[in-house]
Image (cartoon, rainbow, N blue to C red):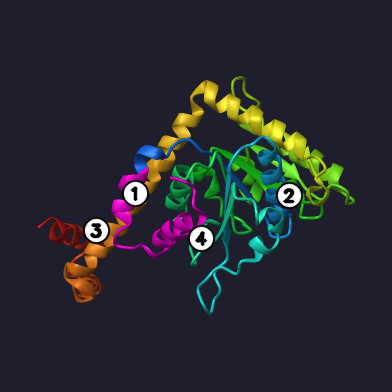
Amino acid sequence: MAGSPRAVARLISLVEDGHESLREVMAALAPHAGNAWVIGLTGSPGVGKSTTTTALVGAFRERGLRVGVLAVDPSSPFSGGALLGDRVRMQDHALDPDVYIRSMASRGHLGGLSFTTPQAIRVLDAAGCDVVLVETVGVGQSEVEIAGLADTSVVLLAPGMGDGIQAAKAGILEIGDVFVVNKADRDGADATVRDLRHMISLGDRTEPGLWRPPVVKTVAAQKVGIDEVMEALDKHRAFVEENGELARRRERRVGDEIETIALTTLRARLGHVGGHEGVAALARDVIAGRTDPYAAADRLVEQLGS
């Protein structure tokens, strides 16, 4: 609660390791969480997510806000840990006591996030962070989980990363609340902005009462356009607070978290009910035609309840 970086680091480590004391920790944190503004940043590798995150941290610190950053990195195929590439790029705030930066390994979890990201956000929230920036693994097509986790989703693109059709294929037109075309000093930036605006105009975002995502040009390395991004973020926050969408997003987010924990617990219990042999025996019955997969699954569920 005092915001000790060491204490926060140890708690997030407990979260990542699925420690046996995690239930006790989450029960203690629950009354103190729920205040932070969670902003997700996603986009293809190389668009400047870490550089943009660093610039946004600086902008929030100028407002006197406490900032937490969760940089979800790809897992090393050898050690299983995060490659820590994002933290290397965030040295500007390394010594600021009101900025907490943590790299988390995705540990093979698809969707651009780590399985334990929601609990890590809760730790930073309870530790007094006003804003939590979640930077995902560079996403490709279909890896768009950040939309379900953040209060505001920022999608970064760069010139030369493909046309508007590629953006539609990747699903980012649906998840973005704010679109940022970074590296706008490169050729093709205006065309990228134009393509994006055109693709957005074809969707249902143009209906009255719905948020229409702005498209902002930046050169994050030079902090150009960051004020415009901050303005867009402020407008989106005011919009979702006013129409009740923020409460709905948070309810959906926590609902997904509860469901994930429940399913994980069920999988663990499956290991104790009949174990691998129990499932294997049912599988043999299905292969032999003595039963079908649905009936076999029902038997497994019955065993769980007994």
**Residue 126 visible in rendering:** yes
Give the mark, 1 or 4, whose residue is nearer the N terminus: 1
Q: Is residue 7 magenta?
A: yes
- For image coordinates 52% across by 71% down, the residue present is 81
Give the mark, 2 or 1, whose residue is nearer the N terminus: 1
Q: Identify which amino acid the numbered label 1 is placed on.
A: Met
Camera-nearest label, 2 or 1: 1
- For image coordinates 47% across by 35% down, the residue present is 35
Q: Position of residue 290 (x, y in %)?
A: 17, 70
Q: CA distance from mark 3 to mark 1?
A: 36 Å
The residue where tag 3 is placed is 294
Q: Position of residue 240 (x, y in %)?
A: 55, 27
Residue segment shown in magenta: 1-29
Q: Is residue 82 above or below residue 184?
A: below
**Residue neighbourhood size for the residue with mark 1, other residues' Cα within 10 Å, grouped as few (<14), some (14–19), many (≥20):** some
The residue where tag 2 is placed is 157
Task: Determine contact: label 4, label 3, CB under 8 Å.
Answer: no
The residue where tag 1 is placed is 26
Q: Identify which amino acid the numbered label 4 is placed on.
A: Leu
Which secondary structure lies at badge 1?
A: helix
Q: CA distance from mark 3 to mark 2?
A: 44 Å
The residue where tag 4 is placed is 110
Give the mark, 2 or 4, whose residue is nearer the N terminus: 4
Which secondary structure lies at badge 2?
A: strand
Give the mark, 4 or 3, whose residue is nearer the N terminus: 4
- The quadrant the C terminus occupies is bottom left
